[in-house]
Image (spheres, rainbow, N blue to C red):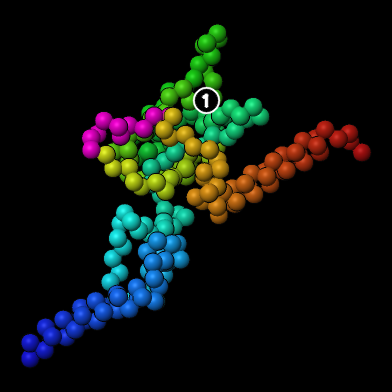
Amino acid sequence: MSGIGVVKGLMVALRHFVETYLDDLKMGRKRYHTEEGIAYRSSKDTRGIFTIQYPEEKLPVPEEFRFIPFLLYEEGPNGEKVDRCTSCGICAKVCPPQCIWIVRTNDPVTKKPIPAPLEFAIDVDVCMNCGLCAEFCPFDAIKMDHDYELATYSRAGNLFDKARLSKPVSYYAGIRPTNYASEEKARKEAEAAKAAAKAAKAAPPA
């Protein structure tokens, strides 16, 4: 009777093989080269062979997917980059593998520290993508990226500096629209509450 089990297993493989071509005929080229096709291949309705032909095909990553952290900057009135990071060092302190290094900017005249990073580096070979740096950042200045195609042939270029880590707020809004919307809503509510409290304090007593 053991031979029947082998035949049944081969029939399953044959069915998947045939259904692959039937599914290809039904979907056409859009099965492999459009967002609709990739979404279909990721669904429970697809038939046949389920292998994604990477890198020609790429599965869309979920919004909460996290990879190497990056720094956010906003554009000033004259187009200049304004870092959200104040180089407070909290991210480096909570980082489990201790792969974040920060150098704070100092005023060239007074030599006093300025709340802005002069240097910011992350060793991506050591980073464990836990997201604690983004979770604990009090200024929403560091976030987790979606870019996972960072393979290199050597370790030389795996120490990301501030220039490589910096990305605009618009990029973050594009990859994490839900999180960005909720954060902006909370930010505006906090600013409104602060303005109301300030106005109430400045108002003359009745």
Could you say which is closer to the camera, residue 204 or residue 71? 71
Q: Looking at the image, how many numbered discs can be counted on the residues?
A: 1
Q: Residue furthest right?
A: 206
Question: For the point 73% across and 43% down, which residue is it?
Answer: 192
Residue 176 in view here: yes
> Which quarter of the image is occupied by the N terminus?
bottom left
Question: For the point 39% across and 46% down, which residue is it?
Answer: 147
Question: For the point 31% across and 62% down, which residue is it?
Answer: 52
Tell me the amino acid under the disc marked 1.
Answer: Ala
Q: Position of residue 66 (x, y in %)?
A: 41, 49
Q: Position of residue 178 (x, y in %)?
A: 55, 54
Q: Residue furthest bottom?
A: 1
Residue 132 in view here: no
Which residue bears the numbered disc 1? Answer: 116
Horizontal side, residue 175 vs residue 50: left or right: right
Horizontal side, residue 109 vs residue 187: left or right: left
Q: Is residue 152 magenta?
A: no
What span is colored magenta in the figure? 153-162
Q: Count residues near mark 1 (Cα–Cα under 10 Å), then give few for <14, some for 14-19, many for 20+.
A: some
Q: Main secondary structure of the magenta part?
A: loop
Q: Secondary structure at mark 1?
A: strand
Q: Position of residue 180 (x, y in %)?
A: 56, 49
Question: For the point 48% across and 25% down, which residue is it?
Answer: 117
